Image: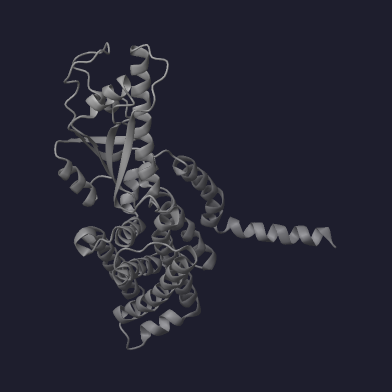
Amino acid sequence: MNLRRSLSFSRRALQQFRHDRRTLAFILIMPLLMILIFGYTFGGDVSNVSVDIVVLDEGHTSGSHLPIDPDFSMASSVIKEIDETTLSINKQTDPDVAQQMVRMGNAWAAVVFPVNFTENFLNYIATPQKSVRSTVEVYLDASNPTIATTVIKTVSGAIQIAISKLAIQLNLTQIEMPISIESNYIYGGGDTRFIDYFAPGVICFAIMMVTTMITIILFVNERRNGTLQRLLASPSSEVEIVVGYALAFSIIGICQSIVVLVTAILLFGITIVGNIVFALFVVLLLAFGHQGLGILLSAGAKNELQAIQFIPLIIFPSVLLAGLFWPIESIPSYLQPLSYFIPLRYGIDAERAIMLRGWGLGEVWIDVVILILFAFLTLAGSVMLLKRRE
């Protein structure tokens, strides 16, 4: 082997970047952006989970030989110990209203302290053999298992802290757990698995990634080969060209979705509650939008190498900020507003609501409208771009 010739090849390869400063900047800056995004989003604790709390507890109403304040309320003691950075508490007075908030998707859980909560608690401490445990009723939207687990864990932790403090106040060495949590699942259930929550996101992500990537590379290649110019010179209009490509990639996207969905059902037994045809329609809208985005981004690329540079800039923010792997509630609060500008978020939200909650258009219409608007703007922009190039 001739080392001198090898070094000359190396020098030639590196000199290419001197004439392509954008690629050089991409090579140096992209790893920095990736580690920053991963560092700030990955593995964060779930926070600001919206929870409605209803206190029906009448407090300490009867006499007791225990040396406690006559106005003592165990429900208030528990609520005081709830970590408000994890749970965002909204007070309600009607349990039915609180449950309805969960059904509408405005809250992840409703926590209800019943009327005799404090009395049952104190009686159980005094005579555990003759009394019943106090019960906290929790109504959960368990379509996201991570958030449901966080709610139960946080409420349970608050109960433990409140009991420990009371034990110190009463000079008791040990108090048997006198409070139980009764979980009622409005959506999902105790057997809802992470794969049930994950599958709708994977379907949307696969469509987004493949559609955008193929569109960018294909249009750059066809422009470089002169195919696009020949198409524009034909009797076909720009609208017909864009719609034709959009339909083609959408069919590919639907086939991918069916493959992923059937595999998930057969191999992993995922749960699907809603209308699968409506779920595929949402995927179709997502495919349309990212096909248009791919055409727009291809305008800024002169070759396939530059085209590939756009792909991580789309994929990584979408993966990390759209709620694909972990809840948006686990993203730092100052980064959460960025998720509203990522179309994948609305596709994932709609798919999960349809497949896990059984929702229809009446509940997810906002997500659908945003996806339609995204598809319209990107496809319209693609038509205008082709007209300008013509």
Q: Could you say where residue 75 lies in the image, as x and y percent from the top left?
A: 24, 27
- The x, y position of residue 362, in whole percent, is 19, 61
Looking at the rendered image, the quarter that the C terminus falls into is bottom left
Where is the N terminus found, in terms of image quarters?
bottom right
Q: Can see residue 256?
A: yes
Vertical order, 183 against 18 (above or below): above
When the figure is inspected, residue 195 is found, relative to residue 107, above or below; the finding is below
Which residue is at 52% across, 53% downward? 26
Residue name at image x 24 percent, y 59 percent: 364
What number of labels is visible? 0
Residue 230: percent from left, percent from top? 42, 84
Identify the residue at horizontal 32%, vertical 29% (top origin).
82
Q: Quadrant of residue 66?
A: top left
Camera-nearest residue between 381 and 284? 284
Asked if residue 334 can be seen in this view, the reply is no
- Viewer-side residue, 263 vs 269: 269
Asked whether, in this view, residue 149 is left or right of residue 98, the answer is right
Residue 373, how many percent across, how many down?
25, 64
Task: Name the residue nearer the viewer: 121 or 81.
Answer: 121
Residue at the far bottom: name it.
Answer: 235
Q: Quadrant of residue 51?
A: top left
Q: How is the image coloured?
A: one colour
Residue 110 position (above or below residue 211) = above
Q: Residue furthest front?
A: 130
Q: Residue at x 25, y 63 (%)?
A: 368
